[in-house]
Amino acid sequence: MFGIVEHPKIQGTGESRFGTVNSHASKIAGSGTCLVRKGRRRAVRLFEQSRSAWRLRTRRRRLGTRGRRIADAAVALMIRAMSRPILLLAGSAEAREIAARLGRDARWEPTISYADRPRVARHDAGRVRLGGFGGAEGFLSYLRRTGTKVVVDATHPFAARIAGRTARLCEEAGVDRLKVVRPGWTEDPGDDWTRVPDAAAAGATLAPGETVFVASGRDPVSALRGRGAHLICRRIEPPSEGFPGPDGEWLRGTPPFSVGDEIELFRGRGVRRLVVKDAGGAASRTKLDAARELGIPVTMIDRPRMPPGGTVATVDAAMAWLEAQWSDA
Ligand SMILES: NC(=O)c1ccc[n+]([C@@H]2O[C@H](COP(=O)([O-])OP(=O)(O)OC[C@H]3O[C@@H](n4cnc5c(N)ncnc54)[C@H](OP(=O)(O)O)[C@@H]3O)[C@@H](O)[C@H]2O)c1
């Protein structure tokens, strides 16, 4: 849609027409600069109006080298004039995919925000920022400073504080916001799950002496300790200070894990229960499938409540929402 390098007036087919072609291309460059000056909104309008007339791609090859360069520069200028800053709050697989897709779309100027350095190496196309914003004030000031008008919150389904705050502050600041959150897991026949509202309630499901596999990050560990169970807590990068007591251990592991991997691990370590956060997603469901195969019961910690409104479940739906934002600009 934005591969514009052809103008209706450029009809030349041979070397003899290149002078004309180049002068048209110069005009294109001029109008591109002018569009930048007149502001993005006007540029969008003008561009949309003239879009059908600017089908330059097929005739681009008829331009001389200089003509192509000028026309390409004009196109780049116009796209830059129209591109919109967008803040992507990352921390999930969906965020990774959205970042990749935004990186291929010149209409957006994405900034990808991580609370922390990503644990798995990323090659995000776009600006990357690391660390919190410094509370609500910091977030509002970030939005103002950068002129961000669109925020996509694709943080983890358990990152409730940032989700609630983003929804509230975006509304206050008149910024369009979308929450992307994948559906939670549902029980299949043969699964033996106990749903609990939080980590404290998960602790109450553990029996003394049993080996428990904890696949729920660092947060719930303190609530699970002191119950006489042995905890095996898997993390991509275990904390350097070691497990905080004699009743457990960190286990290093980098996903993905197949059902076979999980079965081997649970069998090998004599696991008798799983404690899992209802993170959802096919990739990490394998541990639940392995538990079903082995008849191991699962304590499933329910998700925290997310802010109402403006929520989609898939990356495709998020991209469709962005497309609509773009058209409405
Ligand atoms: N909770 C989980 O189970 C889990 C699992 C996997 C990944 N994560 C990811 O880890 C991050 C922290 O999770 P959490 O549960 O601690 O979040 P949280 O409780 O909702 O947020 C805590 C604070 O972390 C900062 N923050 C969170 N996400 C951020 C982002 N994408 N960019 C910049 N700052 C961010 C904010 O700090 P300021 O107030 O300073 O702005 C926020 O107030 C999230 O991005 C989440 O997606 C969480």
Image (cartoon, rainbow, N blue to C red):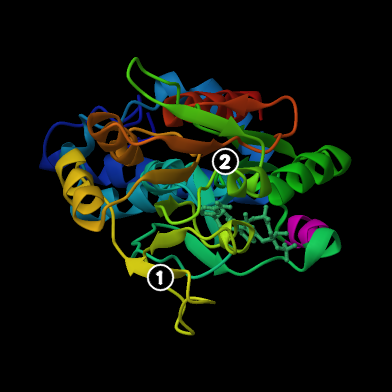
Report helix, strand or loop for mark 2: loop
- The one nearer the camera, 38 or 143, is 143
Q: How many marks?
A: 2
Name the residue tied to disc 2.
Answer: 157
Magenta-colored segment: predominant secondary structure: helix
Mark 1 or mark 2: whose residue is earlier in sequence: 2
Task: Name the image quarter holding residue 295.
Answer: top left
Label 2: few (<14), some (14–19) or many (≥20) C-alpha neighbours in 10 Å: many
Residue at 52 percent of width and 47 percent of height: 206
Q: Residue furthest top?
A: 189
Instruction: Tell me, yes or no, whether the two marked residues, 1 and 2, touch with CB atoms within 8 Å.
Output: no
The kind of residue tagged 2 is: Pro
Q: Which residue is mark 1?
A: 249
**Which residue range is magenta in the image?**
139-145
Ligand 1 within 8 angstroms of badge 2 C-beta:
yes
Q: CA distance from mark 1 to mark 2?
A: 25 Å
Q: Is residue 222 left or right of residue 141?
A: left
User: Which amino acid does the dot numbered 1 rest on?
Assistant: Glu
Left or right: residue 229 versus residue 19 is right
Q: Quadrant of the C terminus?
A: top right
Q: x%, y% of residue 97?
A: 38, 43
Q: Is 148 colored magenta in this rendering? A: no
